Amino acid sequence: MMKSCLSGNDKERDNDNKRQIEKARQAALRKLSARERTEKEILDFLKEAGCTHEEAAEITAEFREWGYIDDEKYCRRYFEYGRSKGKAAPRIVSELTQKGISSEKARRVLAAMKEEAGGDGWTEDRQAALSVGMKMTAAQRELGKAIDDKFLAKVGRRLTGLGYDSGTCYYVIGKIRDYGREREREREDE
């Protein structure tokens, strides 16, 4: 029979460490049950909970193996969510990198999604931005307000905040301006 090399205190410390790791694992699982997270978010959470980098990496590897963490799936869902909010692809990529997803992975997932959808990103971004601008224009009209330079500047700020480049912003502003002119002509003809 082999004797353990660990003294009573060492065994107790080892058991305390195992309990702490298990407690951190359970807390991470609760965090994942609340909403999907990136691997880096869980890794950072586990380190903050007292796990060493190696222990945290081992736990996240288990979660990845079990399908609880999947950064590619997270990217896809985050892109869909961001698009539903009118955000531009570069803004979404930036937000994903802040969550620990590499920009290369985020761009690769975006490219795959665009290929699956059969669209090109340039047109998609312009259409999404135009949709945001036209919604704002409809709301402005509903309030009985003019489509003036002040309003167009507001649209530009909103689109910039959503991550659209200046070319896309100017395109949308031009379309809204054209729309405003058409509406004015229609009123004059009445």
Image: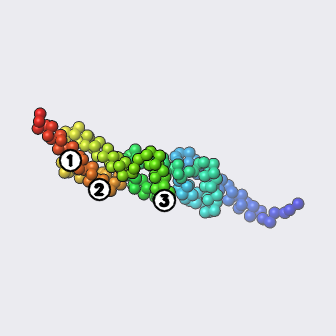
Residue 159 visible in the picture: yes
Q: Which residue is painted at 39% across and 55% down in the image?
A: 91
The percent coordinates of residue 125 (x first, y second) are 36, 50
Labelled disc at residue 104? 3
Which residue of the protein is positioned furthest toward the top in this rendering?
190
Residue annotated with mark 1: 177
Residue type pointed to by label 1: Arg
- For image coordinates 24% across by 47% down, the residue present is 175
- Label whose residue precedes the other's in the sequence (3 or 1): 3
Q: Is residue 83 above or below residue 99?
A: above
Amino acid on which disc 2 is placed: Gly
Residue at (53% x, 56% y) in the render? 41
Q: CA distance from mark 2 to mark 1?
A: 15 Å
Give above or below for 104 relative to 76: below
Q: Disc 3 on helix, strand or loop?
A: helix
Q: CA distance from mark 3 to mark 1?
A: 37 Å
* Left or right of 60 in this view: 119: left
Tell me where residue 13 sits by quadrant: bottom right
Q: Secondary structure at mark 1?
A: helix
Which numbered tag is attached to residue 58? none
Q: Give the spatial CA distance, label 3 vs label 2.
A: 24 Å
Q: Earlier in the sequence, mark 2 or mark 1?
A: 2
Q: Residues within 10 Å of mark 2 (few under 14, many from 20)?
A: few
Q: Which residue is mark 2?
A: 167
